[in-house]
Amino acid sequence: MSLKIVITGNAEDNLGAIYDYHAAYSLDYADGFHDKIVKFITNNLADFPESGAIFNPRLGTRRLLYAGNHNIYYIVGGEVAYVLFIIDGRGILNDELREAGNASIDEIIT
């Protein structure tokens, strides 16, 4: 059974920023990258929700790597996988997310 995939507002914002970054030098590349990462997320999380490494055990967040640099953070709840963030792995925000252990799931997905 495939899970429903929900890309949260934060993750949508991340995708928009990634698109804008690529569009600054090539709209064709930006379009292609966006389509490929969304397809990767949809296909992998729907059919293999446990494929991502556990990132924060207390919150149940997982991390899936795309194209060597992009970390896809998500949680699975029931029949739904919630994509929380999509972040370039070279940034310090990844470390900040690891420390987000005091936040609740409701705070993260809204």
Image (cartoon, helix red, strand yellow):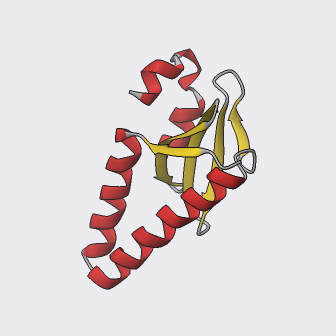
Q: Position of residue 95 (x, y in %)?
A: 56, 38
Left or right: 8 as drawn, with respect to 100: left
Q: Residue at x 34, y 75 (%)?
A: 30
Q: Residue at x 53, y 21 (%)?
A: 105
Assign the C terminus to one quadrant of the image: top left
Q: Is 62 placed above or below 35 here? A: above
Q: Residue at x 27, y 65 (%)?
A: 20
Q: Is 30 placed above or below 3 here? A: below
Question: Farthest residue toward the front?
Answer: 1
Left or right: 58 as drawn, with respect to 82: right
Say which of 10 and 4 sits in front: 4
Q: Is residue 26 visible?
A: no
Q: Position of residue 91 (x, y in %)?
A: 48, 51
Say which of 88 and 5 sits in front: 5
Q: Is 80 placed above or below 26 here? A: above
Left or right: 61 as drawn, with respect to 31: right
Q: How many marks?
A: 0
Q: Residue at x 37, y 56 (%)?
A: 15
Say which of 93 and 76 sits in front: 76
Q: Is 43 placed above or below 30 here? A: above
Q: Position of residue 54 (x, y in %)?
A: 73, 38
Q: Is residue 100 visible?
A: yes
Q: Position of residue 72 (x, y in %)?
A: 56, 50
